[in-house]
Image (cartoon, coloured by chain):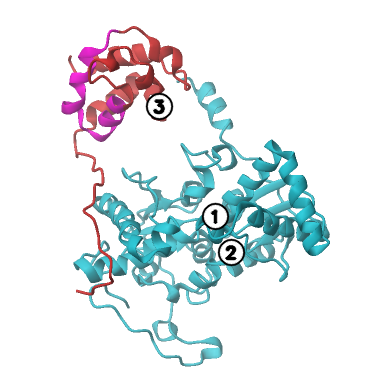
């Protein structure tokens, strides 16, 4: 393929992400799974980059979990989303950025539905007015928070205190990137790189010095799948999906995994413990697992934030082997201390997977 | 071992056969368009030979990428070079030329 042709094709996969002025909404499940990630995101964009990101305590869940679990009908979910848009409109913003991939997929789906079926939008407007006396404008631009970090990845790299490089050998760390299915598999044109070449995390890894691993099951789902996990009888199916990914990536000896979805880091992290306890198998070196991170946590590490302030102690798989490779300093004795250095009880440790 | 009340099913993960992807790399050099394939299957759906034989261009490309060429290559002999796949490919890949390149590289 000639170079210009390649450039032209690639341009179709790009996303024109606005620089500034966003209304930010958090994720309901990320707040408990990886509690510091969203704070880190706001610290980076507002504190480090000086951008205008507004959030309000009045926003709620997008309704995604209930919708995908078929617990609420589509119109209820749309009215919840309409309320979120109303909050954005009331606060004078037009660009909407969400922390969650499920929300991102759902907002995209709703906006596409309303574009195709304007009568549905009219009905939701009426529902919202009857329920809350609010009105809304559809966002001019919808972004996922990883799009923003992707956009500013080079600015973050310029401020980097640590890189995704083995500080002893100088070799780039081998990184698995896992993108949430709802980011671009549903609406390929809405994600950086589309469904075929999603580049949002690979771009960050390359900018921060790491090496992306291209393994056969790279685009396989993490296994969350809502009902597969929510119903206990189906949970083995969820875990088997994750197991398939680990079996596929194992020969490439990854140093870490980066994700941009709430469910993926949770399942890639926690299922390593369950697989180890059930089969005795671990995928990292010396009995450890492969540490799994959100992109905000990695951005925070690169910028030199304290690992325990980033909430890395809430991970199931120990992150210390990676911190040692990157040369990030940390105090092991402070890992399980609470706010203000308060001593809290350390968690119970698993039998078959090593934790520091 | 802990019983969580649910278990694993054996992994069906695809593994690249080490050292067997050299010819595929050569094919990529000779026919860079092969990387544009997104495995949509339009070629397989429109294939004249596919109705009667094992010919399936989508599967062929995927198998070559993964190094399973010994199982995949017999398919190529069924291709009649009718070019229907060429017409339907949404990525504009010259599939007929690609098949002829595969024949050259893999000595068919």
Q: Colour of chain A?
A: cyan
Under tag 3, what secondary structure? loop
Q: Disc 2 designates what residue?
A: A27
Work out whether mark 2 precedes mark 1 in sequence or the reverse, and give the earlier one: 2
Q: Is residue A273 left or right of residue A191?
A: left
Chain ID, mark 3: B
Q: Is residue B105 above or below residue A17?
A: above
Range of magenta residues = B59-80
Provide the residue designation for mark 1. Answer: A102
Q: Can residue A94 be seen in the rendering of this structure?
A: no
Shade of chain B as shown in the rendered figure: red
Q: Position of residue A36 (x, y in %)?
A: 55, 71
* Residue at 29% in and 28% down: B59
- Using the numbered discs, state the Cα–Cα distance from disc 3 to disc 1 in whole angstroms: 28 Å
Is residue A275 left or right of A4 when viewed as pictured? Answer: left
Residue A122: where, in percent of width, then height? 77, 46
Query: How would you rate the neighbour count of disc 2 (Cα within 10 Å): few for under 14, some for 14-19, many for 20 or more?
Result: some
Quadrant where the N terminus of chain A is found in the figure: top left
Question: Quick check: do tags 3 and 2 share a chain?
Answer: no
Q: Which mark is residue B37?
A: 3
Q: Kindly identify which chain the residue marked by label 2 belongs to.
A: A
Task: Using residue A88 as the reference point, say whether residue A72 is left or right of it.
Answer: left
The 10 Å Cα crowd at callout 1, few under 14, some 14 to 19, many 20 or more, is: many
The C terminus of chain A lies in quadrant: bottom left
Left or right of B41 in this view: A180:
right
Q: Are marks 2 and 1 in contact (CB under 8 Å)?
A: yes
The image position of residue A186, as x and y in percent, is 52, 42
Which element type, helix, strand or loop, lies under badge 2?
loop
Question: Against B89, is A271 above or below?
Answer: below
Q: In this orientation, does residue A169 appear?
A: yes
The CA span between labels 3 and 2 is: 35 Å
């Amino acid at each position: 393929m000639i170079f210009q042709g390649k450039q032209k094709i690639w341009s179709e996969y790009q996303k024109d992400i606005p620089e500034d002025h966003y209304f930010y909404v958090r994720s309901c499940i990320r707040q408990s799974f990886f509690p510091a990630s969203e704070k880190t995101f706001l610290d980076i964009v507002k504190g480090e980059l000086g951008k205008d990101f507004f959030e309000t305590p009045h926003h709620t869940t997008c309704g995604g979990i209930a919708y995908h679990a078929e617990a609420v009908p589509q119109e209820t979910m749309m009215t919840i989303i309409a309320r979120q848009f109303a909050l954005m409109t009331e606060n004078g913003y037009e660009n909407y950025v969400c922390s969650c991939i499920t929300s991102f997929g759902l907002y995209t789906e709703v906006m596409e539905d309303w574009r195709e079926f304007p009568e549905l939008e009219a009905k939701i407007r009426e529902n919202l007015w009857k329920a809350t006396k609010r009105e809304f404008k559809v966002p001019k631009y919808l972004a996922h928070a990883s799009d923003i970090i992707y956009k500013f990845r080079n600015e973050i790299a310029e401020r980097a205190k640590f890189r995704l490089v083995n500080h002893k050998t100088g070799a780039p760390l081998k990184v698995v990137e896992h993108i949430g299915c709802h980011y671009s598999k549903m609406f390929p044109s809405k994600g950086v790189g589309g469904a075929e070449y999603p580049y949002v995390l690979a771009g960050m890894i390359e900018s921060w010095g790491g090496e992306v691993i291209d393994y056969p099951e790279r685009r396989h789902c993490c296994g969350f799948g809502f009902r597969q996990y929510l119903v206990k009888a189906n949970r083995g199916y969820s875990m088997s999906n994750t197991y398939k990914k680990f079996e596929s990536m194992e020969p490439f000896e990854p140093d870490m995994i980066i994700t941009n979805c709430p469910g993926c880091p949770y399942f890639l992290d926690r299922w390593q413990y369950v697989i180890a306890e059930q089969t005795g198998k671990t995928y990292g070196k010396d009995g450890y697992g492969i540490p799994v991170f959100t992109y905000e946590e990695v951005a925070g590490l690169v910028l030199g934030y304290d690992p325990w302030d980033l909430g890395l102690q809430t991970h199931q798989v120990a992150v210390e082997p990676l911190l040692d490779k990157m040369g990030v300093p940390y105090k092991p004795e402070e890992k399980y201390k609470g706010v203000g250095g308060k001593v809290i009880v350390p968690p119970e440790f698993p039998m078959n997977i090593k934790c520091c | 071992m802990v019983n969580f009340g649910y278990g694993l099913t054996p992994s069906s993960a695809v593994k690249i056969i080490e050292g067997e992807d050299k010819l595929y790399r050569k094919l990529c050099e000779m026919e860079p368009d092969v990387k544009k394939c997104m495995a949509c299957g339009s070629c397989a759906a429109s294939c004249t030979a596919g109705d009667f034989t094992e010919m399936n261009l989508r599967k062929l490309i995927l198998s070559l990428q993964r190094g399973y060429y010994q199982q995949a290559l017999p398919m190529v002999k069924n291709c009649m070079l009718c070019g229907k796949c060429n017409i339907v490919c949404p990525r504009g890949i010259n599939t007929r030329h690609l098949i002829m390149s595969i024949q050259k590289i893999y000595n068919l």
